[in-house]
């Protein structure tokens, strides 16, 4: 079969990780395709508010950044990976500035301009470089513009991956659904890179965009890659509570600038849970809020920064200020009702220090991967840094490898001769809703063995229904996302069942303490064990 598209490198995902990798490879005149499931701005990078952690303050150090990251990771970070990532912080920021990203600056004591640094949860210093409270948008738009200008990069919008094509443990291409034209197309490439983001949409409440359905993790698992630490789903502590708010994220930087979490009667509560108060790591803050909500039978708590000058709030948080105004909340005058929501997938496809997976010529970068940086809990603003550092690492390895590779041939045919158009789309929407509800109820912030068993029973039934539906009807974007979500949901549950302790983001009432009787271990699942 002759492939419809041939490229040296196929990058699946158009966020910070995918576009950074494409731009770095393009310097070597490599022919690169970048696929975006929806619009180029539909990924999580575009919606990231906080910023990127990097050492710029003279009072800070890479040793301190490393120590904070290791502390947040609760004993499961790979220390060498942490050091590697942190040491590339300044270089990564400098590269983004070269691409046109205009980070927020302030005037130094000597009168010179310097980067303004925020402080967020888990950080012992101010080290979060940002562009007001819309850092991701600034990065995304700059990288998209650079990619559109580059003749070595071809961008494809509304292309949703179906499955990877492999031969003898080597990745040679991918089947992709062109949702604009409602047809399946085949891409062949010497190297394939998954940069598809996380899986927070497996949960009922999420800060993530619609695209975060675990696609890369699911296709890699089906192809034979191991996954690791998927029990560690990070729930962002503070999302706007409003029926029409769609879980709009309220940046951690608000707490970094003095925002206080309070109960409906105005009393603070974080000091009861951690000496760091509002600046404790996200897992602690999210559990504290969840505890107060359930204990008191309330729907939300409040985040209050109204004690700060109105001009300060509008200057530092213009995006959050305007969005809250749309829902009739003036954050300069009143507290914001907030609840936790699924935010970041700390586990993912197991990769090495060059972003290589278990399959030859298949790489994974960004949230889709498990590099060892985050351990049991990601520290705020380390995620965009990880995207940049491992995109560069992958590009270095790919550039070394490409001259030795030939274009794959004889890709197998895609066969849809036995399927028809569905007249039961309600099955997809119903199963989607059921999946996200039981994941929230049983595999959420606080877990038990009984809840996990209930979730596994339900996911097994859904998996069977979805597989039968997939075999009989032509694919749609919604069906592909559901098919991937049910796979990732099962992997999250299996990882959670294997960890018989509470560590980082995984908290279970049956094992409420860290197990210090043995060295901390990563949870690793292998496809051959779960047919």
Image: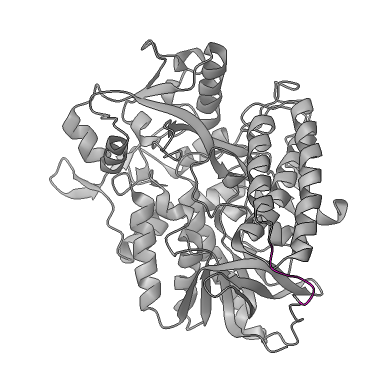
Question: Is residue 47 within the magenta segment?
Answer: no
Question: Is residue 418 within the magenta segment?
Answer: yes
Instruction: Reply above or below: 393 against 123.
Output: below
**1 sits to left or right of 528:** left
Kindly give the residue lying farthest to the bottom in the view shown.
2
Figure disc tally = 0
Magenta-colored segment: predominant secondary structure: loop
Which residue is located at x 57 percent, y 66 percent?
394
Q: How is the image coloured?
A: one colour
Specify start and end residues of the magenta stretch as a single range: 417-422
> Is residue 521 visible from the viewing direction of this image?
no
**334 sits to left or right of 253:** left
Q: Nearer the viewer, residue 360 or 295?
A: 295
Which residue is located at x 68 percent, y 46 percent?
431
Position of the N terminus by quadrant = bottom right
Which residue is located at x 45 percent, y 40 percent?
246
**191 sits to left or right of 317:** right
Q: Nearer the viewer, residue 287 or 429?
A: 429
Q: Position of residue 488 (x, y in %)?
A: 69, 49
Position of the C terminus by quadrant = bottom right
Q: Position of residue 506 (x, y in %)?
A: 66, 32
Q: Position of residue 308 (x, y in %)?
A: 23, 25
Q: Nearer the viewer, residue 404 or 178?
A: 178
Splitting the image into 4 quarters, where does residue 152 fall? bottom left
Q: Position of residue 298 (x, y in %)?
A: 49, 17
Kindly give the residue lying farthest to the front in the view shown.
423
Which residue is located at x 29 percent, y 32 percent?
328
Q: Nearer the viewer, residue 412 or 272?
A: 412
């Amino acid at each position: 079969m002759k492939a419809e598209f041939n490229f040296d490198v196929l990058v699946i995902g158009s966020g910070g990780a995918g576009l950074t990798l494409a731009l770095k490879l393009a310097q070597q005149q490599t022919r690169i395709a970048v696929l975006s499931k929806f619009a180029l701005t539909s990924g999580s990078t575009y919606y990231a508010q906080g910023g990127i952690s990097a050492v710029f303050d003279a009072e800070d150090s890479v040793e301190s950044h490393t120590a904070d990251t290791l502390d947040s990771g609760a004993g499961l970070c790979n220390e060498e990976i942490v050091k590697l990532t942190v040491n590339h912080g300044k270089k990564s920021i400098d590269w983004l500035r070269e691409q046109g990203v205009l980070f927020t600056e302030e005037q130094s004591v000597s009168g010179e301009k310097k980067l303004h640094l925020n402080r967020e949860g888990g950080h012992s210093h101010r080290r979060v470089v940002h562009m007001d409270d819309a850092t991701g948008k600034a990065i995304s738009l700059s990288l998209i513009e650079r990619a559109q200008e580059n003749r070595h990069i071809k961008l494809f919008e509304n292309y949703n991956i179906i499955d990877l094509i492999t031969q003898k443990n080597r990745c040679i291409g991918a089947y992709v659904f062109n949702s604009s034209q409602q047809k399946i197309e085949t891409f062949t490439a010497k190297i394939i890179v998954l940069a598809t983001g996380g899986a927070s949409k497996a949960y009922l409440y999420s800060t993530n965009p619609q695209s975060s359905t675990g696609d890369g993790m699911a296709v890699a698992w089906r192809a034979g890659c191991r996954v690791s630490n998927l029990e560690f789903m990070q729930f962002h502590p503070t999302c706007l509570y409003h029926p029409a708010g769609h879980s709009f994220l309220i940046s951690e930087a608000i707490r970094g600038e003095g925002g206080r979490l309070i109960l409906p009667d105005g009393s603070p509560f974080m000091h009861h849970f951690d000496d760091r108060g509002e600046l404790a790591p996200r897992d602690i803050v999210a559990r504290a809020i969840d505890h107060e909500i359930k204990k008191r039978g309330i729907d939300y708590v409040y985040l209050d920064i109204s004690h700060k000058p109105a001009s300060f709030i509008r200057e530092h948080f213009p995006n959050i200020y305007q969005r809250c105004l749309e829902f009739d909340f003036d954050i300069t005058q009143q507290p914001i009702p907030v609840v936790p929501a699924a935010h970041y997938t700390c586990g993912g496809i197991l990769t090495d220090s060059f972003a290589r997976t278990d399959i030859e010529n298949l790489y994974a970068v960004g949230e889709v991967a498990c590099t060892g940086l985050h351990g049991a809990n990601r520290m705020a603003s380390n995620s965009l840094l990880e995207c940049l550092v491992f995109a560069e690492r992958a590009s270095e390895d790919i550039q070394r490898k490409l001259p030795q590779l030939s274009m794959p041939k004889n890709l197998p045919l895609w066969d849809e001769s036995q399927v028809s158009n569905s007249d039961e789309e309600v099955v997809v929407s119903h199963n989607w809703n059921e999946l996200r509800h039981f994941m929230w109820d049983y595999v959420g912030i606080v877990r038990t063995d009984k809840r996990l068993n209930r979730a596994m029973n339900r996911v097994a039934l859904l998996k069977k229904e979805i597989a039968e539906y997939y075999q009989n009807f032509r694919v749609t974007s919604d069906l592909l996302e559901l098919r991937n979500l049910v796979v990732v949901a099962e992997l999250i549950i299996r990882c959670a069942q294997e960890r018989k302790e509470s560590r980082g983001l995984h908290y279970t009432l049956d094992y409420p303490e860290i197990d210090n009787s043995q060295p901390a271990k990563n949870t690793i699942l292998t496809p051959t064990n779960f047919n």
